[in-house]
Amino acid sequence: MTKKHYIGFISILIIGIIAGVYYLEVYRPGTAELPKDVVMETAFGEEFDFTDMPKRVKMIEFMYTQCPDVCPVTTLEMSKLKHELEKEGVFGDEVEFITITIDPKRDTTEVLRDYASRFEVTSSEDGWTFLTGSEENTKKIADALGFLYRDPGSGEIVHSTYTYFLDEDDNLLEQFTMGEDFDREKAFNRIMRTIN
């Protein structure tokens, strides 16, 4: 293979990879198919019905308040992302966050309300909803997004490490790594690209 052919082959390969990434992340979104028969309770004691969600893009986070590391770091990063989206004037109107506890036995509405307040969320009208519900309903939402978790009985729940970004029709557009690897800039750009 000559140098000219080699450069041409590499160029075609790079273009193919870029096209594939574009197809997977932009052109062909996955469908999350959130269950329509799930009703949960917000941290402020209100009913939250998954059949009655407003048409907004959404970031969904699973966590539990006793988590020693990944969960609070992710929620903090989402709080920073919220502030950036507020500066753009889109948070609450076009973008919402939903945080769901995977430890509903211990994370009562009171516990969840205290957790939410640490991130300056003081009502369900803030555009960021913190939810608790039955173990069955929690699992239905988690399963719809491919989020895995289990309680081995040690008090620390083993779980997946992704947050989920969905468009207004609940198409799953992207997953973001939780914890210190949460890419706030990438998430911000993805959200803005989707709503504009």
Image (spheres, rainbow, N blue to C red):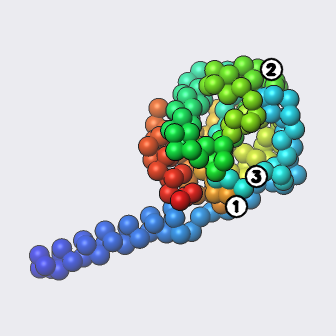
Q: Position of residue 181 (x, y in %)?
A: 46, 37
Camera-nearest label, 1 or 3: 3
Question: From where the camera sits, is residue 86 visible?
Answer: yes
Mark 3 closeness class: few <14, some 14–19, many ≥20 residues within 10 Å:
few
Camera-nearest label, 3 or 2: 3
Tell me if residue 103 comes above or below residue 162 in the rendering.
Answer: above
Question: Which kind of residue does numbered mark 1 sit on?
Answer: Asp
Question: Which kind of residue does numbered mark 2 sit on?
Answer: Glu
Picture disc at residue 52: none
Q: Position of residue 74 (x, y in %)?
A: 56, 32
Q: Position of residue 34 (x, y in %)?
A: 76, 54
First along the sequence among labels 3 and 2: 3
Residue behind mark 3? 54
Residue 196 or residue 108, whichever sits in front: 196
Q: Is residue 165 left or right of residue 39?
A: left
Mark 1 closeness class: few <14, some 14–19, many ≥20 residues within 10 Å:
some
Question: Which kind of residue does numbered mark 3 sit on?
Answer: Pro
Asked if disc 1 and disc 3 are in contact, CB closer than 8 Å, the reply is no
Q: Is residue 17 left or right of residue 138?
A: left
Residue behind mark 1? 169
